[in-house]
Amino acid sequence: MELIASEQKEMVANVPNQGKATLEEKFHYLVSQSEVFAHFLAGSVAASTKKKKGKGGNRGKKGRLTEAEEDAQLLKSAQSKRRTIRLDRQPSNLAPHCKMHPYQVEGLNWL
């Protein structure tokens, strides 16, 4: 308990007074705090420089397509002869006592 109390007193002594601190004191305090958390940044940089395994080639984050790949995919789908069907009411192959809500029909169209 005494150790904690002494650390708290030391922390209070290191914190500049809110109203009376000059800009230079505030700056030095912030710089000292940034040095405390520098190891977090160093860890994130080290984690991002690790070689990622798996396929993906030159793709971005977690399998995202590049602009050129996305454009090629959109052109391919636009030139395709495959057409989609949009439902405005529930399918007739459902039992007569089943009634789909509008959000369910919308979800079915999304699939």
Image (cartoon, rainbow, N blue to C red):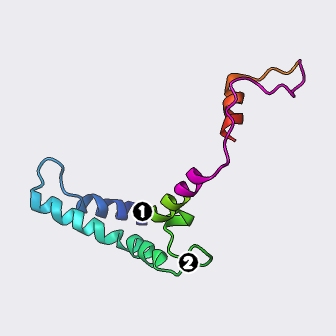
Horizontal arrangement in the rendering, residue 74 relative to residue 21 (left or right): right
Q: Residue at x 34, y 70 (%)?
A: 36
- Residue 11 to residue 58: above or below: above
Give the CA distance from mark 2 to mark 1: 43 Å
Q: What type is the residue that disc 1 sits on?
A: Ile
Residue labelled with disc 1: 4
- On the image, the x and y values in percent for residue 75 come to 52, 56
Quadrant for the C terminus in the image = top right
Horizontal arrangement in the rendering, residue 58 relative to residue 93 (left or right): left
Q: Residue at x 48, y 67 (%)?
A: 60
In the foreground, 67 or 72: 72
- On the image, the x and y values in percent for residue 95 come to 90, 23
Nearer the observer: mark 2 or 1; the answer is 2
The quarter holding residue 46 reads bottom left
Q: Residue at x 29, y 67 (%)?
A: 34
- On the image, the x and y values in percent for residue 10 come to 29, 64
Magenta stretch contains residue 22: no
Residue labelled with disc 2: 52
Discs 2, 1 touching: Cβ within 8 Å: no
Magenta span of residues: 74-96
- Residue 39 to residue 20: above or below: below
Q: Residues within 10 Å of mark 2 (few under 14, many from 20)?
A: few
Magenta stretch contains residue 87: yes
The local secondary structure at tag 2 comes to loop
Predominant SS of the magenta segment:
loop
Q: Residues within 10 Å of mark 1 (few under 14, many from 20)?
A: few
The quarter holding residue 83 reads top right
Q: Which mark is residue 99?
A: none
- On the image, the x and y values in percent for residue 17 come to 18, 52
- Residue 31 to residue 108: above or below: below
The earlier-in-sequence mark between 2 and 1 is 1
